[in-house]
Image (tube, coloured by chain):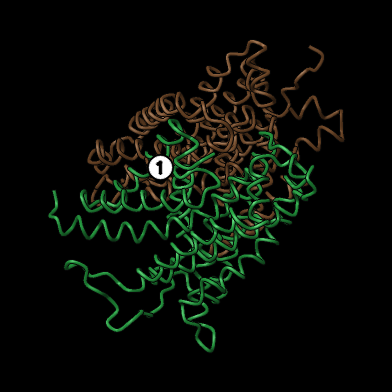
Chain colours: A green, B brown
Amino acid sequence: MPEASVLLANTIYGLLYGSILGIVASGLSIIWGVMKVVNLSHGYWAVVGAYVTIVLYKYVQPSIDPLLSPYIAFALGAILGGLFYYAALHLVIGKVETMTLKAEMSSLLSTFGFGIAIYGFMFFLIGRGYVGQFESIDWTLGNPPSIEVSGIAVRKAQIAAAGMATLIIILVDQFLRKTVLGMAISAVAQDSRAVSLVGINPIRIKLATTVISTGLALMAGALFTVAYPSGINPDLEAKLAPLSFVIVVLGGLGSVIGSYVGGIIIGLTYMLTLGITGSDPIALAVTFIMLIVVLVVKPTGLFGR
Amino acid sequence: MAIVYSKAVPLGLAGFFALGGILLYLGLISAGTATYMIDLMYYVGIALAMAIIMSYTGYVSFGHTVFFGIGAFITSLIMGVVYGEALKQGANPYPYFIMGTLLGMAIAAGLAAGVGLVVLKLRGAFFAIATIGLDYTVLNLVKLYEGGFGGGEIHFFVSQSTEEKYVVFFLAFLVTLGIAYYMRISRIGYGLMAIREDEDAAEAAGVDTFRYKILAFTVSAMIAGLWGGVIAWRDAGMVAESSFSLLNSVYMIVMNTIGGLGTFVGPIIGAFIFYPLYRELLTSIPQVALLPMGILVIAIVSLVPEGVAGVLRRWVSQLRRYVY
């Protein structure tokens, strides 16, 4: 059993990592909970967002502070989300009132197609030399860049990113609960036919949901780079997407608070297992076993409807 | 039964590749062409493996590559670790290859049956995600194996001539084709298709859906395991990241989707469209090919969901005897 300082370190890192994972998962939770679309492109969008921070800092003149990138990424994601809705979703589920198995599988496959297309496009850009396959930025926050918590060094950038993630989650949750559009979106999640009966156009809502979800995905990716500014590459999707699915299922579909809490749980599980066993594969295996367990035992998750 | 299912496609396909083998033996085709056909047999093979659970039964096993990976891993363990020394000294590799592959197939089938008991209770997308979780779990467990090459990597000594590769791939292909064909035209196939169309109605009509699903998943996994073993033999080893890579599943799904779900011929057509296209698009960076592939998948799912086979059946009714 490792000593207390290692456990403390991994707990702190787990909380920070978990909040980032939580916001990455939140976009997926929304689109899945509201539209019943299992968006297999979600992870790829997050990676796009991660690259946004890199590109804005490294390749754009004047250089843009990574702390601003998440907001630019959100705006970009919102626009791309509109495109994504019409390209991959509208024809498949636009007019569908209740999701049948066929519609669900079709949207699964079409979002999957879009996802691998994004992945291929990234490598296309890499091949042409627009970005590197492995990108890092030599940016730090603060001088000195770390603070000491009970003898554990924690980078300020990570804290900033985690803090921003937490605030944004709260904001999005408030949006979904208190604003007219937000409530309409939540309503569609419950009964889309009833929504159209009271005069709200479900297609508009689906579009809005996709826009917000994609915006969040890119924003979360950008925040990821703020916290972990090295080693950004297209295969990061393989790290983020599967964990996002675990987190959404754990937290409950459609709940951003659920995603956040789920993210924290998974982040802690991963980091502590890593700290105790010292093995990255075991830590990952444990989180994926959790996915299967949750799917079978309580598929609605902690905060799910 | 009003519709007679012509055996033309499976026999023609077997004949086509048999002809290729004969031409190779006679020296009438180059090694390059033969290798192209060998790869094509592999892609049709894995398309058919996936077809049993996806095209016939309607369950999209996104993590299906896990069974391929298990086949590769077990075969590599047998040939590289257990009998590695013997092979280095020049022993005949075939007994070990067969042993490894059969064991790999059995373990893949066993895993499918075991996990299937649990995950086949899940609908649609949840099943798909659970299989992804399974793949990542097994990938990470395999990566714990340290064989001296790094986590989850095994290499061993074997080499084959193009002719040998052709024969082995052809045999694996025949087994795959035969099993997939039988699953389709037999009573099991009717049951699976009924599950695909409407699982609740099938259950109500008396189809033991759970048993059929387990059977389909197990057989499908077993064939994936077979190809895993074959590829490990050809490549003289395996790398976990590659053998368990979801890219393999991507190809299987793309071929099934393009070709047309709910048919036997569809995935075969899908493979014949996918592979040449994939080779054409292949540049120094193989992942770039996924961009047009992804767009193609979206186009098919949105505009032509029944796939090429479905279109053929709909427009040319005379083809229904052949395209099923």
Taking depth in this image into account, of A229 and B70 the one nearest to the observer is: A229
User: Disc 1 on helix, strand or loop?
Assistant: helix
Q: Residue at x 45, y 23 (%)?
A: B117
Q: Specify few, some or many for label 1: CA neighbours under 10 Å numbering under 14, 14-19, or 20 or more.
A: many
Asked if residue A62 lies left or right of residue B184, the reply is: left
Name the foreground residue: B225 vs B127: B127
Q: Is residue A107 left or right of residue B21?
A: right
Question: How many badges with numbers are in the image?
Answer: 1
Q: Is residue B24 above or below residue B99?
A: below
Percent x, y of residue B97? 37, 34
Quarter placement of the N terminus of chain B: top right
Q: Is residue B289 visible?
A: no
Residue at point 14%, 55% (across, down): A4
Residue A148 occupies quadrant: bottom left
**Relative depth, front residue between B13 and B153:** B153
Identify the residue position indicated by label 1 in the image: B232
Residue B293 in percent (x, y) is at 65, 53
Would residue A180 appear left or right of B175 to someone viewing this image?
right
Residue A40: horizontal and vertical position, in percent? 57, 49
In the orientation shown, which residue stands out farthest toward the bottom? Answer: A62
Q: Residue B244: x, y in percent?
A: 43, 45
